[in-house]
Amino acid sequence: MNPRQRRGVLLMILAALGAVFVFITVLGYVGKVRADADAAVGEMTTVLQVQSKVDAFQPISASQMKQTQVPKKWTTPAFITNLADLQGKVAAGAIPQGAYLQQGMLLEAPALQPGQREIAIMIDAETGVAGKVMNGSIVDVYATFDSTQNGRQTTAACAVRILNRVQVINVGKVQAASPDAGKQPNTAQASQNSGSVLPVTFALNSNDTLGLTYAESFARKVRLALVGGTQDAKPPFNRLCETPQAGR
């Protein structure tokens, strides 16, 4: 091997040694950065993350959740970590995909008490609800009836409070009024006025269920009225016929 070849081999060995040194240096730097990052992040914990959007007041199933690891110092006790905590709960509002589940996002699912009946009626989405009635709202239910003629006997037009201080357990989605809703005057009226209705569900005793069914079937219109406070300043009238008198 001549001197030129020996110098070439020596340079190749030096280059290889330099590459190994650079590799070891970079590997050590990456390890240090990773260790510093792990030390900065700290201990990890498991939380529940929403995999698909959950609509307001809908039950949350385990299939819609995934368990994921996040730094514990970024969480609070409000974060939900156990799938068993979803039992009997519904979403308090719309929960977007990717959100981390927390206690304020859940409500207890409404349940029927002994003797109660669950009943839903269709209400005009604009004049009957106006977007303010929601799950858990306390409402009065009013119905208006047209005057009727039965032989020589005339029944005056009336506005009647069918239900007093009842709780709404579910408000459904707005939908187009059915064109064949003629058998339900209030729904037909909704179709003429706004073209949209929505189901409102109550949990009632048997007598109130019967009264509400009668009103939905025969009333010209059914309205909901939000109720404030725990009691009325004075007992309200249950029934007004024809034109209400001033000051009543």
Image (cartoon, rainbow, N blue to C red):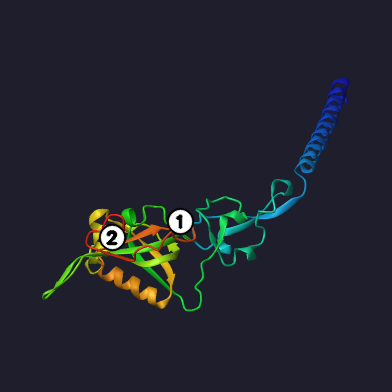
* Pick the front one: 145 or 194: 145
Single out the mark in the foreground, 1 or 2: 1
Q: What is the residue that sits farthest to the top in this orientation?
A: 4
* Pick the front one: 103 or 212: 212
Q: Is residue 16 left or right of residue 49?
A: right
Q: Is residue 142 left or right of residue 88?
A: left
Q: Quadrant of residue 10?
A: top right
Q: Position of residue 28 (x, y in %)?
A: 83, 37
- SS for dot 1: loop
Q: Position of residue 57 (x, y in %)?
A: 49, 60
Residue that carries the numbered disc 2 in the rendered image: 177
The circle on residue 91 is none
* Pick the front one: 5 or 82: 82
- Amino acid under disc 1: Gly
- SS for dot 2: loop
Q: Position of residue 58 (x, y in %)?
A: 49, 61
Residue 178 visible (yes or no): no
Placement of the N terminus among the 4 image quadrants: top right
**Residue visible at 85% across and 31% down?**
17
**Residue visible at 51% across and 56% down?**
54
Q: Quadrant of residue 168?
A: bottom left
Placement of the C terminus among the 4 image quadrants: bottom left
- Amino acid under disc 2: Ala
Crowding at dot 2, Cα within 10 Å, few <14 / some 14-19 / many 20+, comes out as: many
Residue that carries the numbered disc 1 in the rendered image: 228
Instruction: Give whichever of discs 1 and 2 has the lower sequence position.
Output: 2
Q: Is residue 35 left or right of residue 150?
A: right
**Residue visible at 37% across and 62% down?**
236
Crowding at dot 1, Cα within 10 Å, few <14 / some 14-19 / many 20+, comes out as: few
Marks 1 and 2, how far apart at CA? 30 Å
